[in-house]
Image (cartoon, grey):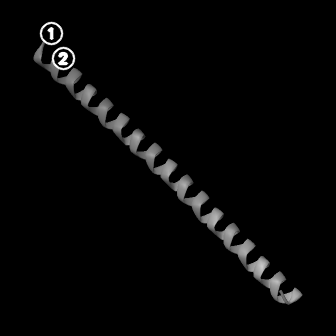
């Protein structure tokens, strides 16, 4: 195998590894974003329920 072939093979492997790492980072980032979005939505819905419950208690005088 010539030096050029070996160098090209090595470069291709390095490029492939970089692409795989980049894809893994993107997947991790997307998963984290989905988790944070769910967390925010959940917190908002819990807060909404608390506000409605407090409003109902004030309305009934309890």
Q: Residue 37 or 52: which is nearer the viewer? A: 52
Secondary structure, mark 1, is loop
Q: Position of residue 56 (x, y in %)?
A: 84, 82
Image position of 58 with respect to 32: above or below: below
Q: How many marks?
A: 2
For image coordinates 23% across by 21% down, the residue present is 9
CA–CA distance in space, label 1 to label 2: 6 Å
Q: Position of residue 60 (x, y in %)?
A: 88, 86
Question: Which residue has dot 2 on it?
Answer: 5
Figure quadrant of residue 24: top left
For image coordinates 41% across by 39% down, the residue present is 23
- Looking at the image, residue 56 sits to the left or right of residue 8; the answer is right
For image coordinates 80% across by 84% down, the residue present is 55
Q: Residue 7 or 28: which is nearer the viewer? A: 28
Q: Quadrant of the N terminus?
A: top left
Image position of 25 with respect to 57: above or below: above
Question: Which residue has dot 1 on it?
Answer: 1
Cβ atoms under marks 1 and 2 closer than 8 Å = yes
The label shown at residue 31 is none
Q: Position of residue 62 (x, y in %)?
A: 83, 86
Figure quadrant of residue 40: bottom right
- Looking at the image, residue 19 sits to the left or right of residue 12; the answer is right
Q: Classify mark 2: residues with Cα within 10 Å, few (<14), some (14-19) or many (20+).
A: few
Q: Residue 52 or 21: which is nearer the viewer? A: 52
């Amino acid at each position: 195998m010539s030096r050029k072939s070996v160098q090209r093979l090595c470069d291709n492997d390095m490029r492939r590894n970089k692409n795989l790492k980049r894809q893994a980072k993107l997947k991790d980032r997307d998963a984290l974003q989905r988790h944070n979005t769910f967390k925010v939505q959940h917190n908002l819905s819990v807060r909404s329920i608390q506000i409605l419950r407090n409003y109902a208690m004030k309305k009934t005088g309890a």
